[in-house]
């Protein structure tokens, strides 16, 4: 039997180098965790897949120090309109073009290969993070102390293995890690074939518009999305009697697009049939194996929340792994990962299914009920982000499980840039006796003196303090000094992680 010490060792192995895996690797780099990323492909997949992310995701990209590098590759989205077969608006999901309390805009459009290139390029900043492409993981064997990860180096045919404290599967819908966890999937009932067509415009077509359009036509539901640059996307329902391969042939694709564009307007970049699913893994963790992103859940795309959900997963998970690996926190901390994230994911998937019922015209009234009726105007949709499920939140205190805002500090910085990927305590009174002790423990404390908006926000919520986690969710609040003492008691030096370089 070979000595365990003969194997290369890492704290965490991430299987999959897509946007979720690459974001997790950057967060673990920020935490000082020895990380290996294993990716089967040689390079970034060159065609677009996800096309939207939100203000919370951009806040995570800010945390890892890459938001400024991502900004040149995105455009703002004005929102989405749902139209009936006659072109009348059923549902108005316009997005404000102002900054949200997160400190970013509510909706961004992007080209996934551009985003992945920035995220992967960011890994070079972390000497303790290693990326290996063309590595196909085929076996995971865990014991009480570690996981034995076996993979094939596809460039040489060599069989390799390493040992890791934890393995995170960011390896998509057909996840190998999920199979080793042994998790079944809960089926939420939505499964439809759609033809996804990406085109590159040859000439200006401003008439297509910047809004995403959902054509809720019972004959052939379809979606239009403006991408970055000259990219435009249509997603068109494949009818039950149609062959998936036949509808991807150029002549058929142009026939389906003919109501909008023709070959003189654009060239086809990709046409492929996908089945949109709505499923959630029953078990996101088995000992030292965990899931994130599409390996844990899949959603119809109608909310644009598929990749966003995975980014939220890893923002929740990375700081907990850091606390366990680096600072000796109890491994049971990871039990709060699924319990917090699954209800959040499920609520978004269920709303996406309801909107799908409007688009495919099978449940229009039930879907429209998700919005706000208006007199002599289409139903208005405003999506509120779900709360975290039960986990680390402190009791039933106000705002626990909600996202905290980001504040503009008096010195011009954003509060997240000062705090880093760490806990922060927002307090109304700078003279609170706990300030010095917590500062010496490496815990950031921000008060009304740092930004007037902090005090204004606390007073508006009827609280004197709020404890915010590294993933920017509120862990607990205090309405008085005794409740503040309770908040201070849960802060440990192990919760501190430095900001990105």
Image: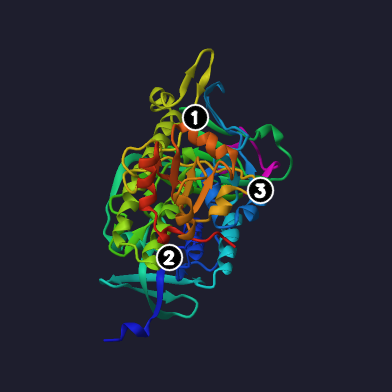
Q: Secondary structure at mark 2?
A: strand
Q: Residue drawn 42% across and 60% down? A: 493
| Magenta stretch, residue numbers | 253-268
Cα distance in 3D space between marks 3 and 2: 38 Å
Cα distance in 3D space between marks 3 and 1: 33 Å
Q: Report x, y in % for residue 93.
A: 53, 29
Would you say the residues marked 3 and 2 are in contact, meaning their CB atoms lie under 8 Å apart?
A: no
In the rendered structure, the answer to whether residue 467 lies left or right of residue 334 reads right
Give the label, 3 or 1, closer to the camera.
3
Q: Report x, y in % for residue 299.
A: 41, 44
The residue indicated by pointer 2 is: 14
Q: Secondary structure at mark 1?
A: loop
Q: Is 92 located above or below residue 498 in the figure? A: above
Q: Is residue 367 magenta?
A: no
In the image shown, does 274 or 133 lie closer to the viewer? 133
Q: Secondary structure at mark 3?
A: loop
In the rendered structure, the answer to whether residue 264 lies left or right of residue 431 reads right
Count of numbered labels shown in the rendering = 3
In the image shown, does 268 or 306 lie closer to the viewer? 306
The residue indicated by pointer 1 is: 382
The residue indicated by pointer 3 is: 411
């Amino acid at each position: 039997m070979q000595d365990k010490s003969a194997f290369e060792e890492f704290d965490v192995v991430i299987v999959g180098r897509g946007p979720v895996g690459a974001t997790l690797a950057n967060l673990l780099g920020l935490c000082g965790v020895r990380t290996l990323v294993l990716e089967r492909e040689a390079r970034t997949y060159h065609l677009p897949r996800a096309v939207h992310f939100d203000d919370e995701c951009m806040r995570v990209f800010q945390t890892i120090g890459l938001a400024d590098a991502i900004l040149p590759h995105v455009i703002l989205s004005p929102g989405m309109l749902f139209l009936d077969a006659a072109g009348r608006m059923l549902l108005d999901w316009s997005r404000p073009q102002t900054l949200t309390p997160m400190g970013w805009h509510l909706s961004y459009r992007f080209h996934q290969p551009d985003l992945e290139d920035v995220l992967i390029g960011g890994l070079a900043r972390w000497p303790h993070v290693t990326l290996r492409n063309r590595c196909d993981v085929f076996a995971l064997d865990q014991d009480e102390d570690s996981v034995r990860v076996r993979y094939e180096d596809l460039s040489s045919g060599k069989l390799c293995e390493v040992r890791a404290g934890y393995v995170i599967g960011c390896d998509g819908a057909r996840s190998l890690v999920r199979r080793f966890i042994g998790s079944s999937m809960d089926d939420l009932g939505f499964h439809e074939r759609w033809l996804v067509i990406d085109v590159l415009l040859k000439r200006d077509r401003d008439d297509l518009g910047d809004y995403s359009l959902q054509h809720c036509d019972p004959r052939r539901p379809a979606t239009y999305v403006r991408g970055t640059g000259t990219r435009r996307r249509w997603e068109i329902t494949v009818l039950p009697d149609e062959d998936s391969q036949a509808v991807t042939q150029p002549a058929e694709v142009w026939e389906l697009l003919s109501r909008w564009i023709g070959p003189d307007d654009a060239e086809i970049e990709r046409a492929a049939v996908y089945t949109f699913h709505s499923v959630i893994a029953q078990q996101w963790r088995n000992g030292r194996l965990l899931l994130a992103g599409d390996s844990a859940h899949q959603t119809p795309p109608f909310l644009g929340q598929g990749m966003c959900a995975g980014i939220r997963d890893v923002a929740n998970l990375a700081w907990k792994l850091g606390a366990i690996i680096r600072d000796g926190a109890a491994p049971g901390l990871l039990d709060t990962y699924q319990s917090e994230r699954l209800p959040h994911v499920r609520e978004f998937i269920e709303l996406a299914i309801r909107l799908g019922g409007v688009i495919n015209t099978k449940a229009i009234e039930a879907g429209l009920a998700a919005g706000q009726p208006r007199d002599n105007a289409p139903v208005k949709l405003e999506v509120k982000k779900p709360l975290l499920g039960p986990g680390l939140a402190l009791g039933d205190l106000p705002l626990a499980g909600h996202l905290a805002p980001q504040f503009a500090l008096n010195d011009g910085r954003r509060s997240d840039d000062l705090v880093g990927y760490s806990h922060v305590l927002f307090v109304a009174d700078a003279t609170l006796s706990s300030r010095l002790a917590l500062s010496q423990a490496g815990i950031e404390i921000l008060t009304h003196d740092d930004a007037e908006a902090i005090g204004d926000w606390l007073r508006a919520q009827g609280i004197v303090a709020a404890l915010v986690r590294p993933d920017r969710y509120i862990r607990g609040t205090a309405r008085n000094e005794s409740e503040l003492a309770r908040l201070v008691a849960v802060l440990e030096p192990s919760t501190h992680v430095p900001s990105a370089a």
